Image: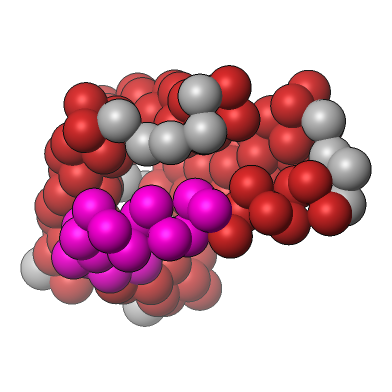
Amino acid sequence: MDVALKITLVAAIVFMGYNIAEFAENYSKVCEKTDEFKKMAVENDAGEASLRRSNLLLSLILSLVFVGLTYLSGLAFWVTAVVAVKLVFSLYCSDSMLIRVLRVGEVSKKIYMLSKVDSLLNALLSLGIALILVL
């Protein structure tokens, strides 16, 4: 097994586990995390622009690494393209939730459900990648 394949398999399993944990969180837990995040942002005097930029940068780097790993693993180009498109959607969902939290101060049910769908799709995508790599 190629090194890139092994690293991609581990990354896919970690990504799947993280998204399953995100999917399993209930609305009240998300609201608690949101309140803690807002308190930390106020304590650190972090502005909306800097928070959005750091969120985008970190998420983008992790997404690019995962897309790069799928490419280096020798998967079909269309699989890598699907992963890239899905992760762009995840970046959008993450930014939408962050904007909502910073501007309104709460997570709406619509954004909460969008994040649930996103987490479920990410978990299924990473499961599919892991299965493709193993089989």
Which residue lies at the image location 58% right of the left edge and 42% below the top edge?
Answer: 59
Q: Where residue 112 sits: x, y (%)?
A: 26, 38
* Placement of the C terminus among the 4 image quadrants: bottom left
* Placement of the N terminus among the 4 image quadrants: bottom left
Query: Residue 52 falls in which quadrant of the image?
Result: top right
6 is within the stretch colored magenta: no
Q: Is residue 118 left or right of residue 85?
A: left
Front residue of 78 and 29? 29
Front residue of 85 and 25? 25
Q: Is residue 10 left or right of residue 119?
A: right
Q: How many marks?
A: 0
Is 126 above or below relative to 24? above
Which residue sits furthest right? 45
Is 122 above or below relative to 9? above
Is 43 above or below relative to 20? above
Q: Is residue 121 visible?
A: yes
Q: Where residue 96 sits: x, y (%)?
A: 45, 23
Q: Where residue 11 sits: x, y (%)?
A: 43, 67
33 is within the stretch colored magenta: yes
Coloured how? secondary structure
Which residue lies at the image location 65% right of the left edge and 39% below the top edge?
Answer: 55
Is 129 above or below relative to 13? above
Q: Where residue 46 sits: x, y (%)?
A: 84, 40
Which residue lies at the image location 52% right of the left edge and 33% below the top edge?
Answer: 105
Q: Is residue 68 left or right of residue 39?
A: left
Q: Is residue 9 visible?
A: no
Q: Which residues are magenta?
A: 18-35
Query: Residue 45 falls in which quadrant of the image?
Result: top right
For the stretch drawn in magenta, what is the main secondary structure?
helix
Which residue lies at the image location 43% right of the left edge and 60% below the top edge?
Answer: 32
